[in-house]
Each structure stands twice: as structure tokens, then as C-alpha cells.
Image (cartoon, helix red, strand yellow):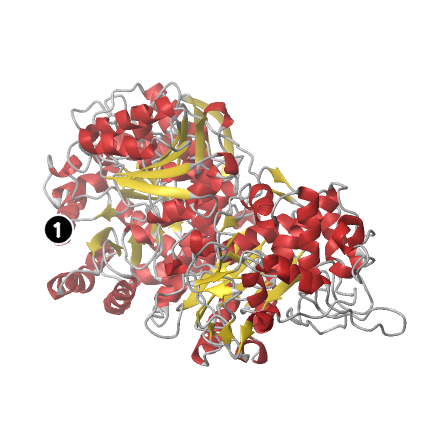
Amino acid sequence: MRHKLAGIFLLCFVALSFTSGKMDVAVVVDDPLNAPDRFAQKNWVDSVFQSLSSEERLGQLFMVAAYSNKDQKHIDEISQLVKDENLGGLIFFQGGPDRQARLTNYYQALAKTPLFIAMDAEWGISMRLDSVPDFPRAMTLGAIQNSDLIYDMGAEMARQFKELGMHINFAPVVDVNSNPENPVIGFRAFGENKKAVAQRAVAYMKGLQDNGVIANAKHFPGHGDTESDSHYSLPLIKHAEKRIWDIDLYPYQELFREDLMSVMVAHLNIPSLDNNGQTPTSLSKKVVTDLLQKRMNFQGLIFTDALNMRGVTQSHKPGEVDVEALLAGNDILLYSQDVPKAKALIKQAIESGKISQEEVDRRIRKILRAKYKVGLHEYKPIKTHGLVERLNTPKTEEIREKLYSEAITVASNKGELLPFKQLDLKRFASLTIGGEGKNFQQSLSKYSKFDHFEIEKAASESAHYNLMKQLEDYDVVVVGLMGVTNSPKRAFGIAPGDVALLRKLEQRQKVVTVLFGNAYASRFIEGLGNVVFAYENNDMTQKLSPQVLFGARPGMGILPVSVSPTFSYGVGGYMEGLRRLAYGTPESVGMNSQTLNEIDEVVEKAIKMQATPGANVLVVKDGKVVFERSYGQLEYKNSPKVNSETLYDLASITKVLATTQAVMFLHSRGELDMDKTLGDYLPELKGTNKEDLVLKDVMAHEAGLKAFIPHYVKTVQSGQWRPEYYQASAAPGFSRPVSNDMYAVDGLRDSIWNWTVESDLLPKSGGRNRYVYSDLTMYFMQAVVEKIVNQPLDQFLEQNFYAPLGLYTMTFNPFNKMSLDNIAPTEDDVAFRKRQVRGYVHDPGAAMYGGVAGHAGLFGRANDLAVMMQMMLNEGYYGDVSLLKPGTVSQFTKRQSNQSRRGWGWDKPEPEAGRGGSAGDLAPKSTFGHTGFTGTCVWADPKNDLIYVFLSNRVYPDAENKKLLSSNIRTDIHDIIYKAMAKN
């Protein structure tokens, strides 16, 4: 950052700004290598310089390549160079963090002068090291409109660099990539627009330099319009000088204004800048000295590009090329191949007058000044303990999530198909071509029912034909185009037959193609109606792109390059989201990952004490799922592990996510009045003791109804089924399944209803009904709903709630709809059903009622519950569906009586301060939700926009297992979630 003028001791210079090759107004800027305390900096530089012999001083001009994945011979070679040649620094390449850190400490201990440690890490240290995640490539960053995010990335990279004892990142690439055929820049550039490139480059640079790491702009004067790779040849650029000034040098001018500390000079042949044969720009005095330093007045460090590249080695030998680079005006000779020879030749050049001793010394001092600036005057060894954990922090993941999310670009959206709406009217399939897309397909399945297909790249015509037949009944096919490469010469890995397949599919159904790779590859899919750019193929882009397709996140990216008439620069911009659930990191919503990790210990304790064989825990904050973990197994021994798709019997959560939802739906439309009685809606109750029960009292559990009625005892005798009620196989008159190989008489539901209607009411206390939590409330409310809608409760909910919300696994009676393999078993019911219950509702009364009862019978995944509760927090709105009118949610979820904590249907925390009841003690009193007998709970907190879901099968194999409740497992987890929200 710029420093303020401070008296006559300020060292300043005039930097001339150019546009279109003409000089503009001169501006005063600081020397970017000045430290805040310039006197201390000068004293240190003088001291170090004077302590070195002339031979040792020359060593500061060189940086050589080092690896942490090579053998002892390589380590010995580098060690020898550090000791004998007093190298200026090392540039690390492939290896691992811990190995590199230990080598860095070792090499620094050998060095007389502290070493610069650098890395070419354009997309972060993962570009070179294992065990750390990638940051986005530059093309991906070019799609991001918010440059503050790129600054944050640079700052995080700087933090990681400093953890590894590194001082220079050879980034950002500031080439304006105006040639789609460029074989070496392409995806490494921010794009084709000079101003957009400059804006992103400045943000990246500031993020690094504001946090103590030297940024390096490359590849000067511009590698963006080449058709060959300087690693293998000397690329020719034929542009006039005026065009180079106008386009290629523009980002450098903007960076110089912002105190860029270093530049890397490329190996290019640009006759308009130096017409002396085929002199590489890195060896050209006209380019490095006259253009960069004099005309552009750059005062920072100047590095050569690697001196082992064919762009210079095909015309110069090792050692000789170093001298030529020094004579051209470079400060640091990068990736030198022969340091001793180069030093000898430099001394000859000084002796022959090709370069003065004073000029060489000036550059050495300049290097030392930069070393002081990055803290090498106070060198400290790297702390290797816990290094990998410090490199991979939750903050790192938060930044990555934001970057990749905001880059995703909706480039074409025919008929505004995206984001997907009317989910219940569409049959979806997904198809991945040319690569593994497990995370992509799993993420799609969080939003709607998908059938998933995959096919290899360039598959046969017969394979394509068979696939077309398999896909013909689907309305929408979402395609993940994988296996995309960065090679223009090889069509970016896109097979013509695969494109033909997409075009055939699009002729008969709606197709959305997500391009997981280089945006330039899109020229081969020109004309497709719905194309989304993810730019890269990794776990994060595969998880994030479905979120954009379904409106969980807005589509904010813009295409940073022009590829074709349809896919031109700036396409995209903004596609509004639909407020469906997103998925991301706790830190992205202000929560603490480490605190949330304490949930692991609580659940693992529960499993160890056999309070439950397994569980799913899910947390939503601000509309984003930030914690979703599965624990344990479906059973205690030799069974599959619980996963996010595991289906659980929700028990009494049915009351609030089934029956109460229907009641709220009808109430908000004026079709049900909570002040009316059961008799007003159910004529069959006329003349009974239930006729005058008011709906609001029923829903608040204050209508005098018994807690429950064990109906099953009337249907068994001496512990055995009474034959007039049950048979072991289906038969005429016995068609209602109660469990596997157990069928009830067809009239049993009517009998249960009659027994319920005929039941006694509880005595009143003080002239009013006492609060008694009752399952019977929901038998009656189910009957009211079904009478009004003239439809069974489960069908009504499927049509009006679950299907429109994409909740294809939230259902009753899952045994006849899906495999039992991933349904958590409940009780080994020795008293009634005489068998292990799985896929059938655990509650005996609900099972006898046909599996669809107002108080029990609903099954679901944790994600299903989260969607329903988010709809509640959204005041009845979710995605493109509006289910409840404003005010309905707050009316039903507020405390309804001074006798209890209950709302209408909903449970709440205890009203007394510091008591949570079934909720955590830290939950606000506005919280609402419910628990389930099988070991479940769900809570929503409108004050903090927070949802907590806990699903388990604690009743397996014995419903008398009360350890989950007695050990406060669910409430302890709820409190941990609130602690994770606490501000540090």
C-alpha cells in the first residue's frame, strides 16, 4: 500500500503513466521496496552487504529450483549451492508441505544470507504441493465480478505462504488473453478485457502484498496473444508497439500505480519492441531497461522467467544466458542452470565494462532491501508441528466456496428454464460424460428426484443409441461435461460424437449442459440452449453448480472471454435465486467449524453407550446447510453405515411436518377456522363428547384428550394376534399391511377411529382442561383435514407440499416405494408384531391405521426436514412455491397458553429463562419444532435463522432404551450449535 509523504527523507520517484502509447499526467508514488522504517532497512542492507565477499554478493542474483519430493542427491546439490554460492533464494516446485518446511529450515540454516523462498503458485500452493486444496484458476477468477473476493484469496494465500516460510508468489498472471488458441496462457489468464484483467490483478496483488508476500506480475510485456509455448520455443508476437501499449501493458501500468513489488519478464520475440534479430524479451535491454525501467519507471524487483525454458536455451547456453539476462536489466536470474559458470561470466562482464560494478551492487542492494521488506532481517524457522492443519483452515474453505460460487456463469438460458421451477411437473435425469461426477449427481439429488447415468468420453454409436433410449422418458436431462482439457490443439478434450449426442437429446427434451472445464471449449457446444460454465472440475464446483441450477444461489459469473457469437465476453451477469437451501461452510455464515466439530464427540458418545446405533445431524444457518454429518451404522453389528440418504421414521415429527402443515395450509386459505369445533367439520361426532372440542384447544393439547390409547391390546390375546384382526399373508378382507408378513383386516382403521371417538375425556381442573400432550389430537385433526380436502392426508401432502418442494423421500409407508437397505430399522417388536420393524411405521396405532396417521408414520431424510423448516422460516415460501400466507407461521408457532410451552401443534422451549425443555437451554423462546419417540428432533429459530435436525433410531432394537433422553444428547447438540454462533 502507499505510504504517506514523510519529510525530506522520503525516497520517491516519478512514475509515468501511458495509455495507447502516449504519456499522460505524471504521478508521484513510493518505491515499492521501501520498508516503513527506511533507516533501519538501509542499515540492515549496508550491514549485510558489507559482510559479504564480492563472490558471495553475486550469489544474491540467483534463485534455483528446489523440490521436496526428490532424493538425497538433489538435497545435497541444493545444499552445496546454498553454502558455496550464497544463493539469493530458492523457488520450490513439487512436493509436500511438511517436507518442504523441513527442507526450508535446513537450507536457511546453511545460508549465510537469509534466502528468498518462492513458489510459482498461481492458484495457490496446491499447484505445487499435496495435502492442500486449490484456489480457482485465473479464468475462473475472471468470471467473478466482486474483486474483494480475489483480494481475500490473495490474503489467504499470503497467510499460507508465511506458514511455509515463503516470501514471493510468482503470480498473478496479467496477460490479456486475446488469442483462444494460446497454448500456454488460456485458463491461466483473467480474460481478454484489459480493464477487467487489471482490476482482478490489482486485487490479487494487494491481497498478497498487504499481508507481507511479494506479488509478481507476469509475463511482461504480455504473453496473451501467442500460438506457441515459451517453455518449448520462442513465441513470435507481431503486434505494433502502440497496440502493445494499449492492451498488454495496461494491467502493468495499473499495478505500478498500486505499488507492485516485482515483475517477471517473459521469453518472447516482439520485433516492434526489439528488432535485433530474435532476441528474447527477457534478454533485451530495450525491453527490460528502456521500456520497463525507464519508460514505465518500474522500480521493483525484475525477475527473468525460468532460464531453463526453450525460449532462451535454444539460443544460449547455461551461464551465458544468465549474463545476457543481467545485462538486459533483470535483477534476479530465476531457475539458473549453472550458477558457478554464470558468476564467472558476470565477473568477466564487469571487467570488460559491459556492466559496471556499481550497477551490479545496486541490484544486489535492491534484492537485500526486498528481503528486509518481507521480514528476512528477523528470520525465524518454520514451526512444522500442525503445519498441514494450519494451512487448511475453515477460513480457507470459506474463501474457496465464495470464489467458486460467484464464478459460475449461466451463459445461455433458453426459455428461462433456470433456475428450475415446478419440480413436481418434471422428471429429471442426470448424465455425466467423460469423467466421474459423483458429487455433482449427489448434489442434484438434494433438490429433486434424479435418475443418474454416465457414459465415457467418445463412446460408440451403439452406446449413444442405448443411452438415448434410456433417457427418452425424462423431461429434463442435466449433463455434466467432464474430461475437458486445456489443449486447443486437441479440441479441449471435447469429442464430436459427444456433442452430437447432446444436440440429439436437445431436439426432443430440455437439456442443461454444465461445462466443467476451460471456457474456450464451449465453442464446440455453440447453439445449445442451456449452458452453464463451472470453469473447473473439482469437488467444490460439482457441489456448487447444482445449487445455481436450482436457485439456491444466484448465478453471478460473467464469461471473461469471447468464444463464439453466443458465448461472448460479458455473457451471464446475474440470475436471481429462489431461496432454496444452499450448502456451504459454517464460516460463510459466521459460525465456528471447530465448535461445531464438538458435535462429533457427543454423537460418538451416544453410539458408544448404545443410546442409538447411528444418527444424522444437520444444521442450517441463514438458508445454508453448514453441517451435515452421518454417524454410526443402521444396526449395532455388521450393518451398512448411516449416510445422508438414510431414511428415518420421524415418529411425532409427523404431527408438525404432516398434519399441522395441512392445517396451516387450510387455515391460511380461510378453509379452516381454529375457533370452530370438531363437530363443525366432522358430522359423525355429533352427540359425542368430542363434538364441542375447539380446534385451537385440540392443537394446543388442552382439549381433555387422553395422552394415547394402546389400541393394539384389543387385537391381541395371550400375546398372540387375534385371527379376526390379522393374518400372516394378504387375503380377501386382509389387505392392509401392518408390517412385513402381517396384514390387518380391512375394517381395522374404522375400528380404531371408533375406539378413539368413544374414548373418555380427562377430568377438568378448575373448570378448564389441563394440558396433556396427546397423540389423539392428530387423529382428529387428520380427520378434519381429510374431510375438507376430500383426500387422504398422505396424498394431499404429496401433491401440495412434498412433491413441489422436491422432497421425494419424505413419505409414508416407504416399504412399498423404495429399497429397505437404507431405511433405519426401529424396534424388534416382540409384544405386538413379533418381528423387526423396518420400512413400516414404528408406532403401533399408526401401523394399524394403515401407516398414515396424523401423529406418526412420516419418514424422511435430514435434508427433507431442513427444507420443510426453511419453508417455515421463509413464512411459507420456498423455491417457486408459496404454501402458507404471511402471518400463518408466527400464529401457529407462538406460545398459545399459560398452561404449557406449546404452540398449535408445535413444541417450543420452556418459557422460564435458562430452561429449554426438549430444546437446548440456549435456544431463544421464539424457537419452534418437535421431537420424535424414535430418537428424532427438529428445531427452527426465526430469530437467528437457524435449523437443527437430529435423526436416529434409538428404539432399535428395544423401545425401552431411554439413554438418548437421559444423557441429554439432542439438547447438548442444540446448545453446541448456539455456542458455534457466538462471536469471538
Which residue is identified by label 1?
338
Q: Give the residue type that dot 1 points to.
A: Asp
Q: In terms of depth relative to the viewer, which is nearer, 332 or 905? A: 905
Whether residue 42 is visible here, answered yes or no, is no
Quarter of the image for residue 52 reads: bottom left
As drawn, 500 above or below 607: above
Q: In the rendered view, does 793 fall on the left or right side of 688?
A: left
Q: Is residue 645 visible?
A: yes
Q: Hey, which quadrant is residue 237 in on the image?
A: top left
Q: Secondary structure at mark 1?
A: loop
Image height of 854 relative to 709, above or below: above
Q: Quadrant of residue 422?
A: top right
At which x and y percent is residue 340? 13, 54
Is 872 on the left or on the right of 134, as rendered? Answer: right
Nearest the eye: 309 or 953 = 953
What's the residue at 29%, 60% (across, down)?
Answer: 115
Q: Position of residue 58 (x, y in %)?
A: 22, 53
Residue under the point 60% across and 71% down: 714
